Image (cartoon, rainbow, N blue to C red):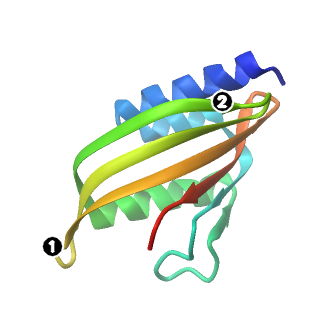
């Protein structure tokens, strides 16, 4: 894996996020056995880790069903070596169940192997 390939994947991920095109992002950039790790277990989950592309799609579907995003920004990618990059996400989102609105900021670190994202890790405050 070269740093140029990893950076190209990072730029494409940021582009898809800016376009709010999650499906294309996951279909094109993620490995089937990719792993997603949150800073803490999500509501209703036993673990902070989700294994497999279908599970990651399920996380996105859960988010879309439970939150309305009023605004969002994506900053990066920030390359690190030949196989990783970081992205900073900021958003103003509303929980559709209770109407609670909050500003969110998180750092995501992506690991790349064989031209695909194989791991994503999210860092944020509780």
Mark 1 surroundings within 10 Å by alpha-carbon count, few (fewer than 14), some (14 through 19), many (20 or more): few
Looking at the image, which residue is at 44% across and 74% down? 126
* Nearer-the-camera pick, 33 or 115: 115
Rendering coords of residue 120 (x, y %): 64, 50
Between circles 1 and 2, the one closer to the viewer is 2
Count the labels in the image. Answer: 2
Rendering coords of residue 28 (x, y %): 60, 30
Task: Report which quarter residue 3 is drawn in.
Answer: top right
Which residue has dot 1 on it?
Answer: 99
In this view, 122 is above or below 95: above
Assign a secondary structure to mark 1: loop
Rendering coords of residue 117 (x, y %): 69, 39
Q: CA distance from mark 1 to mark 2?
A: 37 Å
Looking at the image, which residue is at 66% across and 68% down? 49
Task: Report which quarter residue 29 is drawn in.
Answer: top right
Task: Report which quarter residue 95 is drawn in.
Answer: bottom left
Looking at the image, which residue is at 46% across and 68% down? 125
Assign a secondary structure to mark 2: strand
Which numbered disc covers residue 123? none
Q: Quadrant of the N terminus?
A: top right
Looking at the image, which residue is at 29% across and 43% down? 72
* Nearer-the-camera pick, 41 or 64: 41
Mark 2 surroundings within 10 Å by alpha-carbon count, few (fewer than 14), some (14 through 19), many (20 or more): many
Rendering coords of residue 81 (x, y %): 78, 30
Mark 1 or 2, nearer chain start: 2
Which residue has dot 2 on it?
Answer: 79
């Amino acid at each position: 894996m070269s740093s140029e390939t990893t950076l190209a994947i990072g730029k494409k991920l940021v582009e898809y996020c800016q376009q709010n095109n999650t499906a294309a992002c996951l279909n094109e950039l993620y490995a089937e056995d990719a792993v997603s790790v949150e800073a803490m277990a999500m509501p209703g989950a036993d673990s902070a880790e989700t294994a497999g592309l279908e599970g990651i799609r399920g996380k996105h579907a859960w988010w879309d069903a439970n939150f309305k995003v009023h605004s969002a920004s994506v900053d990066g990618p920030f390359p690190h070596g030949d196989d990783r990059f970081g992205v900073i996400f900021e958003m103003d989102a509303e929980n559709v169940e209770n109407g609670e609105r909050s500003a969110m900021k998180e750092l995501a670190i992506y690991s790349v192997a064989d031209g695909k994202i194989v791991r994503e890790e999210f860092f944020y405050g509780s």
